[in-house]
Image (tube, rainbow, N blue to C red):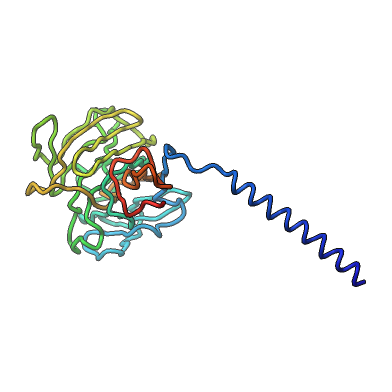
Amino acid sequence: MRLHHLRHLAFFGAITLIAACDTADKTAEAPAPSPDEKVWVDLFNGKDLSDWTVKITGYPAGGNAFNTFYVKDGLLHASYEEYEHFGNQFGHIVYNGGPYSHYELEVEYRFAGDQVNGGPEWALRNNGIMYHAQSASEMSVDQDFPQSMEYQFLGGDGENPRSTGNLCTPGTQVVIAGELRTDHCINSTSETFHGEQWVTAKLIVHGSEMAQHIINGELVMEYNDLQLDDGTALTSGYIALQAESHPTQFRSVRLLNLEGCMDDKAKNFKSYLEKHDPQVCVY
């Protein structure tokens, strides 16, 4: 019995050693991540709002009044099912990560259903991305919109042309083609999207230097010198989605950070980055 037991121990020991060596060989053979491989991060996980903070006008940060934002069937909804009247209760849902300065952001959205009773006329089929924005905690209880740049989404009314991917500037301003623009909203060159079709909106932003709006792969707007109304450069901030009285669905929100390690001697060097952060380099 003792000899039989020892033989079993030797056999299983050999198997364990072979498995360990095989694992080590595979680990050693695993290729290092390519410095050209882009690392996109899903900000919306398709399950819940655990990475986001809701801010509704008239309520403190974190108060999701009337269940304005919720997740169902893998979609993030800006909804008015529990509202009797809009009451100028503008909503934002702010991603907890950040602030971000240089990045690409891609959002898939569509308008669905009818505008809530009491919603302003201009907010029909209207939503957007607020970027370089204040955090939810920095907004006052009665504040309607964060100080930010707004990448505006507009849906068609079924008949008339109405561009999406526009720019609005709550507390901010930009330069377009060398001219300082202080008008609140500026139209893009995009086509009109009627009905409830999905639209892919992409934002490319390099700090305060430059931003581009891309709709379904087409560049529709570009501007420079992002700044506050007093002329202070707006270099970074948080990312938020809106609720402006028309039901909206989001099925994807993902980010490619363009700030990171640009030292090609580091293990985590990425060739596509735009801003160097030496503190994150790994050697």
Q: Nearer the viewer, residue 85 or 186?
A: 186
Q: Nearer the viewer, residue 258 or 85?
A: 258
Occupied quadrant, residue 36: top left
Q: Position of residue 258 (x, y in %)?
A: 32, 43
Is 152 displayed left or right of 184 in the figure? right
Occupied quadrant, residue 66: bottom left
Q: Position of residue 41 (x, y in %)?
A: 41, 47
Whether residue 48 is visible to the viewer of this picture, yes or no, is yes
Q: Pick the quarter of the image with the N terminus.
A: bottom right
- Please name the residue shown 51% across and 43% down the image: 32
Whether residue 250 is visible to the viewer of this picture, yes or no, is no
- Please name the residue shown 18% across and 35% down the image: 223
Q: Position of residue 65 (x, y in %)?
A: 31, 62
Q: Position of residue 167 (x, y in %)?
A: 20, 39
| 214 to 102, vertically: above or below | above
Is 113 displayed left or right of 187 in the figure? right
- Please name the residue shown 33% across and 56% down the image: 97
Q: Nearer the viewer, residue 93 or 174?
A: 174
